[in-house]
Amino acid sequence: MNRLAAALAEVRPIRARVLEGVPHGFLTREGGVSTGTVSGLQFGVGAGDDPGAVAENRRRGIEAVLPGAMLAMPYQVHSPDAVILDRAVEGDERPPADALVTATPGLLVGVVTADCAPVLLADRQAGVVAAVHAGWRGAAGGVIDSAVAKMLELGAESKDIFAAIGPAIAQANYEVGPEMRDAFLPEDEAFFAQGRGDRLHFDLEGYVASRLRQAGVTRVEALGLDTYGDAGRFYSFRRSTHTGEADYGRQAALIGLP
């Protein structure tokens, strides 16, 4: 393998400064074994991908973030629900939820996304972490509040919680209809920008950051990475739809305790 091929084969998690010292990573497409339209480090089990490739991608992702760790991921349903876990789950054991919280060392909790915002949270002092899948429905419905509440149950304090918002669709590429604005409160008007005709552009990352602050999390880092606009690094449901691809991949966001 030449040097370029070796570099492309590496799993290179994106780290957040605010979570320094906590094992975590926002994974990209780099370093995976999936092929075809979902080529790369495809983490989702619902992408029409080869199960063996997904298993190998997950093994590589775990080793890049917290070697030897167990992995727990939910069955994501765009809900406001958060669940506390102390062990690995897979298959039918996965809880239908959109946030996982743990205080168990050696356990990685994670979510998959393909335009929705992945959020990783940690209270280093209490030893509590969380991973959140925040689409607009889940964020508006309270999934971030639920995750923070579960962290507090395990001994975290809101003043000590740090959060990072990973790769998500940017406002410029997130065109929505006027009916979506009706699902938000009047004070959320600032997260919508006028587009062509009656179309609007929604600032998902900005909205998620505001919900974190409303939940009492004041130390928030938004990475400002656009899934739609960077096909080389990220999967995107909307981009795949626009290009007529048969399916779309999912990247992972993982966090745990050593």
Image (tube, helix red, strand yellow):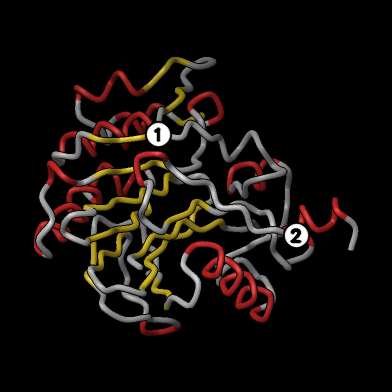
Q: Nearer the viewer, residue 95 or 162?
A: 162
Q: Is residue 216 above or below residue 60?
A: above
Which is in the foreground here, disc 2 or disc 1?
2
In the picture, residue 54 is in which quadrant? Answer: bottom right
Disc 1 packing (10 Å; few <14; some 14–19; many ≥20): some
Q: Is residue 182 above or below residue 95?
A: above
User: Which residue is situated farthest in the bottom direction here?
Assistant: 92
Q: Is residue 134 left or right of residue 62?
A: left
Kindly identify which residue carries mark 2. Answer: 9
Kindly identify which residue carries mark 1. Answer: 222
User: Label 1 is placed on what type of residue?
Assistant: Ala
User: Which residue is situated farthest in the front direction here?
Assistant: 21
Q: Residue at x 42, y 44 (%)?
A: 117
Q: Residue at x 25, y 64 (%)?
A: 101
Disc 2 packing (10 Å; few <14; some 14–19; many ≥20): some
Q: Quadrant of the C terminus?
A: bottom left
User: Label 2 is placed on what type of residue?
Assistant: Ala
Q: Residue at x 12, y 65 (%)?
A: 154
Q: Nearer the viewer, residue 113 or 62?
A: 62
Residue 15 coordinates in the image, percent (x, y): 48, 46
| Distance in Å between CA atoms under marks 2 and 1 | 27 Å
Residue 72 coordinates in the image, percent (x, y): 39, 73
Q: Residue at x 22, y 61 (%)?
A: 128
Q: Is residue 187 above or below residue 240?
A: above
**Mark with earlier residue (2, 1):** 2
Label 2: which secondary element: loop
Residue 85 coordinates in the image, percent (x, y): 26, 74
In the picture, residue 163 is in which quadrant? Answer: top left
Q: Nearer the viewer, residue 62 or 227?
A: 62
